[in-house]
Image (tube, rainbow, N blue to C red):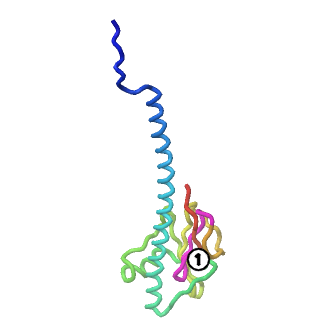
């Protein structure tokens, strides 16, 4: 005499549906996590650039030399170590050397020290040149430029990758 099935448990189709739903939800959450992570990296970079700029401007005011921004990224590179030695610890406890994506921040001043800028290569790590259109861009990969107490160039779109 065969035992009758009691009706407890799940059928194979029910299990496949549950696994498919879990897979779809996982896929969506991974994409959203990636977007949030890139947005956080962008915000961290912007915050770090503001911190460095504030300390740099304070130092410039103390040394009777106030720098102003330029439209073109200045030509005289300032090594990170030189800027750090001039700013830390008097004007800032520490300054970051790398942006949110792990690329080295770049610091420069004009030949006459009348303009200065801080540049991040952005998410893609590639430089777009030295002449920039001022303002927000549609590219999440654009370089971020901070000069004269404001962002001269920055991404204005949500980063997707």
Across the whole image, how many numbered discs are drawn on residues? Answer: 1
The magenta stretch is: 138-151
Question: What's the residue at 44%, 35% (across, down)?
Answer: 18
Image x and y of residue 84, in percent: 43, 77
**Camera-side residue of 83 and 144:** 144
**Camera-side residue of 83 and 42:** 42
Rendered position, 115 above or below 96: below
Quadrant of the frame with the C terminus: bottom right
The part of the image, by quadrant, that contains residue 129 is: bottom right
Image x and y of residue 3, in percent: 33, 12
Task: Verify whether residue 35 appears in magenta.
Answer: no
Element assignment for label 1: strand
The part of the image, by quadrant, that contains residue 96 is: bottom left
Quadrant of the frame with the N terminus: top left
Image x and y of residue 112, in percent: 59, 88
Q: Is residue 154 left or right of residue 15?
A: right
Question: What's the residue at 56%, 56% (across, down)?
Answer: 160
Image x and y of residue 122, in percent: 56, 65
Residue at the extreme top of the image, as rendered: 1
Rendered position, 20 above or below 68: above
Mark 1 crowd level (few <14, some 14–19, many ≥20, 10 Å Cα): many
Q: Is residue 79 left or right of residue 8?
A: right
Question: What's the residue at 49%, 53% (across, down)?
Answer: 32
**Camera-side residue of 19 and 135:** 19
Q: Which residue matches tag 1? A: 152
Residue 82 visible within the image:
no
Task: Verify whether residue 146 appears in magenta.
Answer: yes
Residue 128 visible within the image:
yes
Residue at the extreme bottom of the image, as rendered: 64
Rendered position, 136 above or below 54: above
């Amino acid at each position: 005499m065969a035992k009758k099935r009691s009706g407890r448990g799940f059928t194979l189709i029910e299990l496949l549906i549950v696994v498919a739903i879990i897979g779809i939800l996982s896929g969506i959450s991974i994409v959203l996590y990636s977007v949030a992570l890139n947005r956080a990296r962008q915000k961290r970079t912007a915050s770090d650039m503001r911190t460095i700029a504030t300390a740099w401007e304070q130092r410039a005011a103390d040394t009777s030399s106030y720098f102003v921004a330029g439209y073109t990224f200045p030509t005289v590179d300032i090594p990170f170590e030189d800027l750090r030695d001039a700013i830390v610890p008097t004007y800032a406890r520490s300054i970051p050397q790398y942006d949110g994506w792990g690329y080295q921040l770049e610091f420069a001043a004009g030949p006459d020290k009348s303009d200065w800028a801080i540049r991040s290569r952005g998410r893609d790590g590639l430089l777009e040149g030295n002449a920039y259109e001022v303002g927000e861009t549609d590219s999440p990969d654009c370089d971020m430029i901070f000069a004269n107490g404001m962002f001269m160039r920055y991404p204005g779109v949500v980063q997707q990758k």
